[in-house]
Amino acid sequence: MRKEESNSAPELNIFVSIIVALVFLVILPIVLYKSSDCGKESDMKDQYYSGVIVAKYQDSTQHAYDTWNIQPFNKPTYYKVHLVHEDVVIYNLSEVGDTIYKPRGTLRVLLKRNDLSIDTAFVYDCN
């Protein structure tokens, strides 16, 4: 006499298949989009910064990304801006002591230094 096989094995296989499908159909595209140029462009559009560039360097703790330390006007602290996939032209044009302004919702950046004003934008290869 043979024992009947448990029905839990097919249910487990269906559950695992659903989880795998979710990873490939939902989670993986989100991760790939956020790491793409289009995802980075969208992230940059959401950023706002205004202040003085107090340091400019490649951050060895963050994959040697080009980095600005920006001090907001009339505040003693600064915040870091890591330029991960951004166009290096803006970074190369900037100098410590420059005033920088980047409004939210755009890729436009304004750098000011003494009598010089540079109005430019971040460039992404996003179609």
Image (tube, rainbow, N blue to C red):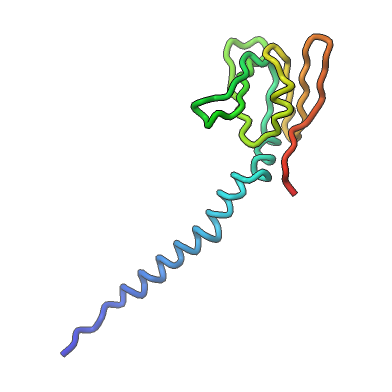
Q: Residue at x 74, y 22 (%)?
A: 93
Q: Residue at x 83, y 14 (%)?
A: 116
Q: Looking at the figure, which quarter contains the N terminus?
A: bottom left
Q: Residue at x 18, y 87 (%)?
A: 2
Return the x and y of residue 40 as percentages of the image width and height.
65, 40
Q: Residue at x 50, y 60 (%)?
A: 22
Residue 56 vs residue 50, the one in the foreground: 56
- Position of residue 112 relative to residue 85, above or below, is above
Quadrant housing residue 124: top right
Return the x and y of residue 27 as percentages of the image width and height.
53, 54
- Position of residue 80 relative to residue 36, above or below, is above
Return the x and y of residue 39 as percentages of the image width and height.
65, 44
- Position of residue 55 relative to residue 33, above or below, is above
Return the x and y of residue 78 as percentages of the image width and height.
59, 17
Q: Is residue 107 toward the left or the right of residue 3 in the image?
A: right
Quadrant housing residue 90: top right
